[in-house]
Image (cartoon, rainbow, N blue to C red):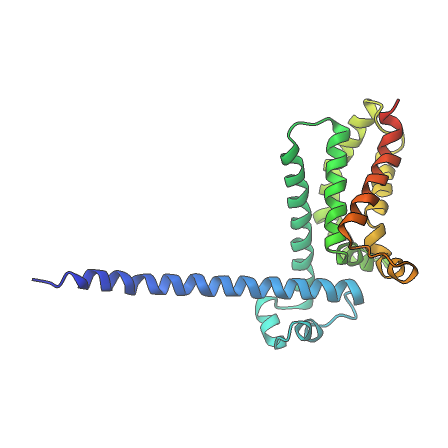
Amino acid sequence: MASPTVPEARDIGARRPVELKRTEQLRAQETRWAILNAALTEFSSKGFEAASIRSIADRIGMQHPLVTYHFRSKEILWQAVAEYVFERVREERDTSLSSFGPASAVERLKLAYRALFHFTVAFPEFHRFILQESLGSSSRLQWLADAFLKPLIGWLLPQIRAAQEEHALPNVEPIVFHYMLISLTSTLSGFGPEFSATSDLSPSDPALAEEYWHTVEQLVFGAFASR
């Protein structure tokens, strides 16, 4: 009679490669995330041209061939960083909208821009990453616009128009209103170092960030809400 332990041993042996594969996949994903975060910091602080694969690897104590194993070139890595951060932005926006249920157009806008603001406070490199490409005309900026900025704006502009029709926002070109809000979402992240140098306050302080955004909402949305 065959030993009853043989099938169990066979099952255990079969599971080990699966578990090993899962562990390797998890480790590879964690490595990719580490590379993407380091690359975001590098690109946002130096710009694409000055950044290098080697300096990105040095930020996380990694051999640069491992970076190129996951991302074959600096251009591919830059695009992966863009996809990574904009996916996070979409997730933050969608989570914020879904957590509050149905809302008016102006409330949807407040939630969307508030989510973007909180994301930029947590990741100040985000706006700087885009700004680096905006400092000059590049094919990368156009790629960002086509792949991410236009779809994001394409969702926001109808909300702005709807809120204007409800007399909840000033009657200005929707794209102008959008970039006004974008400038306000980037104040703490964009002026962070200067802000810290001229005051004893930290732009990353959650209480300060909440107070700031409450003021923005009062200034931008409050006047029309009180009519």
* 198 and 113: which is toward the camera: 198
Q: Is residue 131 above or below residue 160?
A: below
Tell me where residue 82 appears, x and y as whole percent: 69, 56
Relative to 169, say whether 66 is above or below.
below
- Which quarter of the image is occupied by the N terminus? bottom left
Q: Is residue 36 left or right of residue 168?
A: left
Tell me which corner region of the image, top left, top right, bottom left or bottom right, holds residue 212.
top right
- Above or below, 171 against 205 in this view is above
Nearer to the camera, 70 or 72: 70
Q: Quadrant of residue 189?
A: bottom right
The percent coordinates of residue 41 (x first, y second) are 73, 64
Residue shown at the point (57%, 70%) measured from the top left:
69
Residue 178, image x, y percentages: 83, 39
What residue is drawn where x is 75% and y is 43%?
Answer: 150
Residue extending farthest right: 198
Which residue shows up at 73% across the image and 26% down it?
104
Quadrant housing the C terminus: top right
Q: State which quadrant residue 22 falls in.
A: bottom left
